[in-house]
Image: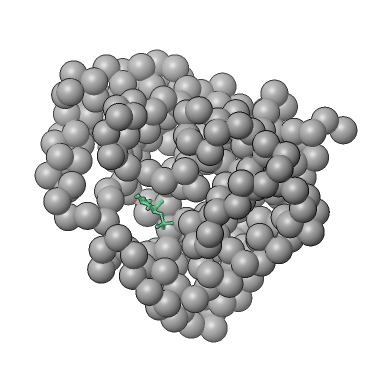
Amino acid sequence: MSLELALSDLAVEVAQEAGELARRRRAEGVHLAATKSSIADIVTEADREVEALIRARLLAARPDDGFLGEESAPDEGATGITWVVDPIDGTVNYAYGIPSYAVSIAAVRGSVVPGEWEALAGAVYGPAGGDLFHAARGHGAYLGDVRLSVTAETAAGALLATGFGYDPSTHDGDLATVRRVMTMARDLRRSGSAALDLAFVAAGRLDGYFERGLKPWDLAAGALLVAEAGGQVSLIDTDSARPMLIAGGTQVHDRLRGIVEEES
Ligand code: IPD
């Protein structure tokens, strides 16, 4: 078995176990542990517990790999491979009881900077809906056993998704982008989980997705899913504090990119 497939199998196994833990904890009641960048940016006790479980399982299976997670200290490792992990992507949904949240686990090689790394494998598991998305570099993207491919552009316009950061001072700029992008949209979704948005682009449930200011763990697994489903992913404005991620089938991606680049 190739390294990529072995890493993907591990990501899948750990994401499922972690997702079931998140779902159990959600049923028992959510407890806020802290706030982060702003009062709206929350961490639940479950985020921390689920990340600890993922980290322990990955460490047991591959003790020399690095780790970069949303809720704990990074570790460089010694193999050149780093696990990039969001234990619960969509934490605000999770806290409110909205079922749109997911465990996101990716293995990347080289840099841990999005756009500079080589993504090898990834899994996005939404335990509330039971959707298990996974991909291995060069081997395609799957939902369970079903191979995924992104959509082509249609005359009806693109079904797009986006998201907003937690810092209110960024909202005006993001809404200005939305206004411009709506010229190519049939409609716009805001799910609250970047990992699921990207997985949905891979699965053809969305035609495209764009968002500024994502963190590596929000996008690592999902971006590989889109690429392995035949789509394009770009990070632009990488010098700014809030680079823009654009994902979709080639035509939708290119149109989105054109609109966003006209702004700058
Ligand atoms: C958030 C979600 C959300 C996106 C935010 C992310 P978190 O991640 O992915 O959809 O709009 O930018 O921070 O905080 O729930 O892990």
The residue shown at (53%, 62%) is 72
Looking at the picture, does residue 130 appear above or below residue 224? below
Identify the residue at the far right of this view: 1
Residue 26, image x, y percentages: 52, 75
Residues 32 and 79: in front is 79
**Residue drawn at the location 33% of the way across and 70% of the way down:** 35
Residue 23 sits in quarter:
bottom right
The answer to whether residue 188 is left or right of residue 49 is left
What residue sits 17% from the left and 23% below the top? 264
Q: Quadrant of residue 260?
A: top left
Image label count: 0
Q: Is residue 157 left or right of residue 115?
A: left
Which residue is at the front of the view, 106 or 153? Answer: 106
Vertical side of 191 occupied by 258: above or below: above
Horizontal and vertical percent for residue 227? Answer: 55, 26
Residue at 39 percent across and 16 percent down: it is 251
Whole-percent x, y for residue 135 in the image: 66, 36
